[in-house]
Image: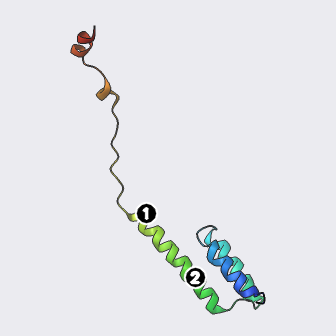
Amino acid sequence: MSFSLHDFLMNGFRSAIGNLPDYKIYANAAGWLEKGVLNEHDLEEIQGLIDEKNAVSSEEELAPEEPVQEEHPEDNMLSPKEIEGQA
């Protein structure tokens, strides 16, 4: 099997999505497009994967949060009658 720079780069871009900021992936992919290693179809694939990742992130942000129970220190305090009963 011979080495393919194209396949090597595409595998790297696929695994970088979600681990690097999107703008870095775009800039790097554009550079390889200018060098003729990647083509527009490759950039469309990368864009689609980034969009998919961002859509999942947006859905997670919109998910309802679990209600947070506030703790009130006074709830843990003993009443005067309870204090007298311990003495």
Distance between the Cα atoms at labels 1 and 2? 21 Å
Q: Position of residue 25 (x, y in %)?
A: 66, 75
Does the CB distance between marks 1 and 2 fall below 8 Å?
no
Kind of residue sitting beneath label 2: Gln
Left or right: 75 in relation to 9: left
Q: Which residue is found at the position 24% from the left and 16% from the top?
A: 82
Question: Which structural element holds mark 2?
Answer: helix
In terms of image quadrants, where is residue 32?
Answer: bottom right
Q: Residue furthest left?
A: 81
Q: Residue at x 34, y 53 (%)?
A: 66
State the quadrant of the C terminus.
Answer: top left
Which x, y percent locates residue 4?
Answer: 75, 88
Per the rendering, the mark at residue 61 is: 1
Residue 74, quarter of picture: top left
Quick one: 12 or 62, which is closer to the camera? 12
Residue 46: quadrant of the picture: bottom right
Name the residue at the top extreme. 87
Disc 1 crowd rating (10 Å Cα; few below 14, some 14-19, many 20+) is few
The quadrant in which the N terminus is found is bottom right
Marked residue nearer the N-terminal end (1 or 2): 2
Residue depicted at 63% across the width and 86% down the height: 43
Lateral position of residue 54 relative to residue 68, left or right: right
| Residue 47: image tag | 2
The amino acid beneath tag 1 is Glu
Q: Residues within 10 Å of mark 2 (few under 14, many from 20)?
A: some
Placement of 12 over or under 35, stated as above or below: above
Q: Residue at x 36, y 56 (%)?
A: 65
Say above or below: 75 vs 45. Answer: above
The secondary structure type at the circle numbered 1 is helix
Q: Position of residue 59 (x, y in %)?
A: 41, 69
